[in-house]
C-alpha cells in the first residue's frame, strides 16, 4: 500500500464550480502537507502548504488537513479554465528529513 | 530569478548510448533530487542528495547514477539507457527549512529507442 493515496480523477467541471481534491496518507510522521500544481509540459509548482492540522486559505484556494483521519483536501472555489492542470498532493516530515512523498496526481479540466 | 535549470529538455537516443541530464540551481539549496514521472505511476524519486558528496538512492535507482561535486549541480547519468527509461524527468531542490518545499525544473523528456 502506498504511503500517500490520491483520488485519481480525472475531474471535469464547468467554470464556476467548486472543486474538491483529496488525499489520504498512512505515515504519522508527516507534518507538512503541500499541494503542487502542474500545467501540461511544465514542472510542478507549489500552490500552498499547511503545517499540521487545520485550514489555510489563499484566494480561491483552501487547503484542509485532518491529521486524526490522515486526510487532506484542496478546495477550489469559482473554478476557472486557467485552473485546468494536474494537482499533486505531497507530504513531508520537514526539517533535514528531506524527502517529500507525492500522490499520483489528479487531472482537473475546467470547461468554459 | 530563483530557478532550477535542466538540460536537455528533449532527447531521443538509442539503447546503450550513455547520456547525462544536467541540473543546476541558483538558490544555494542543500537538498537536490531527481524524479521520473510516468502515466499512472506519479512522481517517483530516483536519487537524492543532502549536500555535496552526499547522495542516496530513492525509490527507483536502478540504471541511473548521480554525482554531487558542487552544491549547485546534480547531474543524472544513464550509463546504458534502455527503453524502459523512456520518461519525463524532473530535477528539484529545496532548503532544509520547514516544509522542504521543492522547486522543480521544467522537465526533460527522454525517449530511448
Image (spheres, coloured by chain):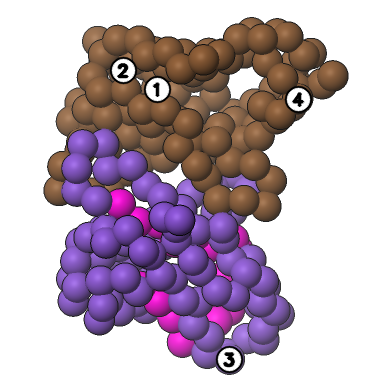
Subunit that carries the residue with mark 1: A
**Separation of residues labelled 1 and 4 (CA atoms):** 27 Å
Write down the region rendered in magenta. B74-94
The image shows residue A67, relative to residue B70, as above or below, that is: above
Which residue sits furthest left?
A: A96
Among numbered discs 4 and 2, the one appearing first in the sequence = 2
Cα–Cα gap, marks 1 and 3: 41 Å
- Asked whether the residues under marks 1 and 2 belong to the same chain, the reply is yes
Q: In the rendering, at what x and y percent does residue A74 appear?
A: 49, 18
Residue tagged 1: A24
| Residue B91 horizontal side relative to residue B97, left or right | right
At 59% from the left and 75% from the top, the residue drawn is B8
Which residue is identified by label 3?
A: B17
Q: Nearer the viewer, mark 4 or mark 2?
A: 4
Q: Is residue A1 above or below residue B59?
A: above
The colour of chain A is brown
**Label 2 secondary element:** loop
Is there a contact, CB below 8 Å, between mark 1 and mark 2? yes
Question: Mark 3 falls on what kind of element?
Answer: loop
How far from the left and from the top, in percent, is residue A69? 30, 11
Where is residue A101? Give x, y as percent: 35, 41
Q: Residue furthest right?
A: A112
Amino acid at each position: 500500500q502506498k504511503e500517500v493515496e490520491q483520488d485519481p480523477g480525472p475531474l471535469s467541471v464547468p467554470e464556476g464550480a467548486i472543486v474538491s481534491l483529496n488525499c489520504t496518507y498512512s505515515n504519522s510522521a508527516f507534518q507538512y502537507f503541500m499541494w503542487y500544481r502542474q500545467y501540461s509540459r511544465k514542472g510542478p509548482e507549489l500552490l500552498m502548504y499547511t503545517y499540521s492540522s487545520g485550514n489555510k486559505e489563499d484566494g480561491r484556494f483552501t487547503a484542509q488537513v485532518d491529521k486524526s483521519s490522515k486526510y487532506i483536501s484542496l478546495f477550489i472555489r469559482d473554478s476557472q479554465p486557467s485552473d485546468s492542470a494536474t494537482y499533486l498532493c505531497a507530504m513531508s516530515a520537514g526539517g533535514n528529513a528531506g524527502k517529500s512523498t507525492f500522490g499520483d496526481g489528479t487531472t482537473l479540466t475546467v470547461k468554459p | 530569478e530563483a530557478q532550477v535549470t535542466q538540460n536537455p529538455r528533449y532527447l531521443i537516443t538509442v539503447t546503450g548510448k550513455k547520456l547525462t541530464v544536467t541540473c543546476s540551481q541558483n538558490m544555494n539549496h542543500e537538498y537536490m533530487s531527481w524524479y521520473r514521472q510516468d502515466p499512472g505511476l506519479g512522481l517517483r524519486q530516483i536519487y537524492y542528495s543532502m549536500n555535496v558528496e552526499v547522495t542516496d538512492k530513492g525509490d527507483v535507482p536502478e540504471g541511473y547514477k548521480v554525482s554531487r561535486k558542487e552544491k549547485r549541480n546534480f547531474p543524472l547519468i544513464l550509463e546504458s539507457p534502455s527503453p524502459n527509461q523512456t520518461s519525463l524527468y524532473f530535477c528539484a531542490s529545496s532548503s532544509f527549512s520547514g516544509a522542504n518545499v521543492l522547486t522543480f525544473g521544467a522537465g526533460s523528456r527522454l525517449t530511448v529507442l
